[in-house]
Image (cartoon, helix red, strand yellow):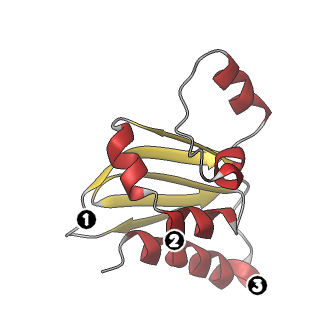
Amino acid sequence: MVRSESAGASLPQFMLGPEGFFARIGQALGWPDIDFSEDEAFSRGYVLKGGDDTAVRALFTPELRAALTSQPGQHLAGMAKVLFWWRNGSLPGPESFNEFLTAGDRVRQVFFAG
């Protein structure tokens, strides 16, 4: 897991993870998922939840959704000035740890750009 923080950020509370079998069952039972009708690839690939749907939708711009869709399997959680990013599984070994950190940093840059 990579934790990032930006003093000037004001992220709405949200959680995002890959959409899988159990997420689809939850949606069928009425558990909310923020979907984007104009972006089926993102909405099929990820489950997005948040406390303020309007603020979360504004945060997840087409550019951000495209960046996440291009690298499936990511998890994110954020609120206020803090962002967490991770992938399922154990930490990578020394030979691929820099690649893992770079992937997390790319996501941080998209969220905290500007």
Quadrant in the rendering for residue 13:
top left
Tag nearer the camera, 1 or 3: 1
Which residue bears the numbered disc 3? 95
Q: Residue at x 21, y 69 (%)?
A: 7
**Residue occupying the far right of the picture:** 21
Which residue bears the numbered disc 2? 107
103 versus 23 height, above or below: below
* Amino acid type, residue under disc 2 in the picture: Val
28 versus 86 height, above or below: above
Real-space CA distance between mark 1 and mark 3, rounded to the nearest whole angstrom: 33 Å
For disc 2, the neighbor class at 10 Å (few under 14, some 14 to 19, many from 20) is: many
The residue closer to the viewer here, 93 or 32, is: 32
Q: Is residue 95 left or right of residue 43?
A: right
Q: Residue at x 33, y 59 (%)?
A: 82
Are the residues flagged by discs 1 and 2 in contact, CB closer than 8 Å? Answer: no
Q: List x then y, in percent, for residue 39.
A: 62, 53
Q: Is residue 51 left or right of residue 86?
A: left
Q: Is residue 43 left or right of residue 107?
A: right
Tag nearer the camera, 2 or 3: 2
| SS category of the residue bearing label 1 | loop
Are the residues flagged by discs 1 and 3 in contact, CB closer than 8 Å? Answer: no
| SS category of the residue bearing label 2 | helix
The residue closer to the viewer here, 16 or 28, is: 28
The tag earlier along the polypeptide, 1 or 2, is 1
The tag earlier along the polypeptide, 2 or 3, is 3
* Amino acid type, residue under disc 1 in the picture: Ala
Q: Residue at x 68, y 49 (%)?
A: 40
